[in-house]
Image (spheres, rainbow, N blue to C red):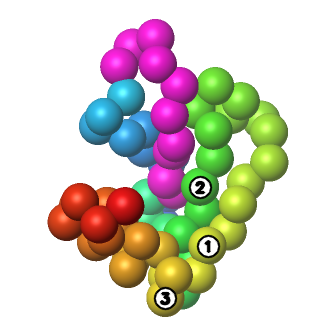
Amino acid sequence: MTEPIRVWRKSSYSGADNGCVELLIPPPPHKAPIRDSKHPLGPVIDFSDRSWVPFVQAVLHGEL
């Protein structure tokens, strides 16, 4: 089985000149790798899917 082709996707809230976060799509199993779009060669933070999904849901519901 071949590995899927993964690409970094910038947040839709980010403008052309604005820095934002990028998420690796599709993410590796049980992870949510995030990086700073202004520093694509910089560090990557690997969140677990168990922590990332509730975080995104809280942001979408205005809880944060």
Instruction: Find residue 33 and report its image quarter.
Output: bottom right
> Mark 3 is on which residue type?
Arg
Mark 2 Cα within 10 Å, few/some/many (few <14, many 20+)? many
Q: Position of residue 7 (x, y in %)?
A: 49, 48
Question: The residue under label 1 is which amino acid type?
Answer: Phe
Asked if the residue at tag 1 contacts the one at tag 2, i.e. Cβ–Cβ closer than 8 Å, the answer is: yes
Q: Is residue 42 left or right of residue 32?
A: right
What predominant SS class does the magenta segment belong to?
A: loop
Q: Which residues are magenta?
A: 15-24
Q: Which residue is mark 2?
A: 34
Distance between the alpha carbons at the discs numbered 3 and 1: 8 Å
Up-down: is 45 above or below 58?
above
Q: Is residue 22 magenta?
A: yes
How far apart in space, not on screen, are marks 2 and 3 (Cα)? 14 Å
Circle 2 SS class: strand
Q: What numbered label is drawn on residue 47?
A: 1
Foreground residue, 60 or 15? 60
Residue drawn where x is 35% and y is 19% of the image: 15
Q: Are marks 3 and 1 in contact (CB under 8 Å)?
A: no
Q: Is 2 colored magenta in this rendering?
A: no
The residue wearing badge 3 is: 50
Residue at 42%, 38% (x, y): give it: 10
Q: Give the side of residue 29 with respect to residue 59, left or right.
A: right
Query: In this orientation, does residue 25 appear?
Result: yes
Disc 3 crowd, CA 10 A, few/some/many (<14, 14-19, 20+): few
Query: Residue placed farthest to the front in the image?
Result: 63
Report x, y in % for residue 41.
77, 35
Q: Position of residue 11 (x, y in %)?
A: 37, 41
Q: CA distance from mark 2 to mark 1?
A: 7 Å
